[in-house]
Amino acid sequence: QVIFGSRLRRRSPHTPSCSGLSPSMEARAPSMQSNASKAASVQDIIVTRREAVRETSLRERLLAEFVGTGFLVLTVGVAVASRSDMAPVAIGLILAVQIYTFGAVSGGFLNPAVTLAVLLSGRGKISAPHAGLYMAAQVLGGVVAGLLAFAGTESTFCFDYAALARPWGTSLELEVLFTMALCGIVLAAGTSNDAPNHYFGFAIGCTVVGGALACKGIDQGSFNPAVTIGMNLANYFNSNATRNPSVGAWFVFLLAPMFGSVLAAMVFRGTRGNEFEAVAEPAQEECASANTKNQLSSSVSTIAV
């Protein structure tokens, strides 16, 4: 059996393939699947591997999302506690590094809003049950990291629009739009036909840096429900905290990013229609083209003789 695109066909053991290799030679090829058949999950298309490996297990993917999100939230807590003007840069860099670290394992979503955007973008990149498990692992990693940041710095903060003396509508708008931008670059650079590429992690990290710098003094710039939950819950454990998030702040910083992810998925579907167009038997078309070339070559050789 040989694989053409996503279809499985039987071929006589004496029939040469369109590549000109015999079946026995094809059996020794390093990969048994084409790129098209391996592109179902983000972790399978986000990198190019030197040799074929087994698909990562669900346990491995959930652990990757837990650890990667944990490092992101830890960096947020420590960077804010340091009161450094470079905090957005540190957060964006760590996010990029974690995406490069775990992208080939789980896709490196590290954000429930990103996970929702990938799910809604379709194309079978992640199933609904796995998306739910991803979100749970991300939130759990965020909570653990928030507590670790508190333990290490003895300082916490919470996401609340009142902390910057701004109306809730300001945070709602900016959280929606910049999360939309973040999810949009994830879909384009990490899940589309543009992948694999070498810039996906850098582009995603830069989006967070840009959004955080743009919102400085206006919105706290979470863009990630796992970050919000991790920081806010750690703040409750701090008896010296000057404020805790209001009910309205919980709604804004949890729901606004998720709405932004929905918008990102809609824009992706509206601008990337070619991602959803079925390509009829691409491998068979390649074979037909190769066979035509072989016939032409044979004709030319016959005429020459």
Image (tube, rainbow, N blue to C red):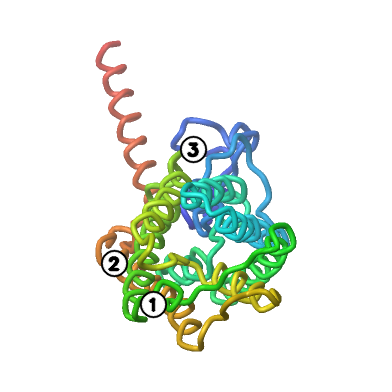
- The answer to which of 108 and 161 lies nearer the viewer is 161
Answer left or right for 37 relative to 214.
Answer: right
Q: Residue at x 52, y 39 (%)?
A: 15
Q: Which residue is mark 3?
A: 17
Whole-percent x and y of residue 232? Answer: 59, 75
Q: Secondary structure at mark 3?
A: loop
Of the numbered discs in the image, which one, if any, rests on residue 259?
A: 1
Question: Is tag 2's residue or tag 1's residue first in the polypeptide sequence?
Answer: 1
Separation of residues labelled 1 and 3 (CA atoms): 49 Å
Q: Residue at x 65, y 64 (%)?
A: 155
Question: Is tag 2's residue or tag 3's residue first in the polypeptide sequence?
Answer: 3
Whole-percent x and y of residue 73? Answer: 60, 61
The crowd level at tag 3 (other Cα within 10 Å; few <14, some 14-19, many 20+) is some
Of the numbered discs in the image, which one, if any, rests on residue 267?
A: 2
Q: Secondary structure at mark 1?
A: helix
Question: Is tag 1's residue or tag 3's residue first in the polypeptide sequence?
Answer: 3
- Would you say residue 281 is visible in this rendering? no
Of the numbered discs in the image, which one, if any, rests on residue 114?
A: none
Whole-percent x and y of residue 182? Answer: 40, 60
Answer left or right for 59 relative to 50.
Answer: right
The crowd level at tag 1 (other Cα within 10 Å; few <14, some 14-19, many 20+) is many
- Would you say residue 61 is visible in this rendering? yes
Outermost residue, top side: 305
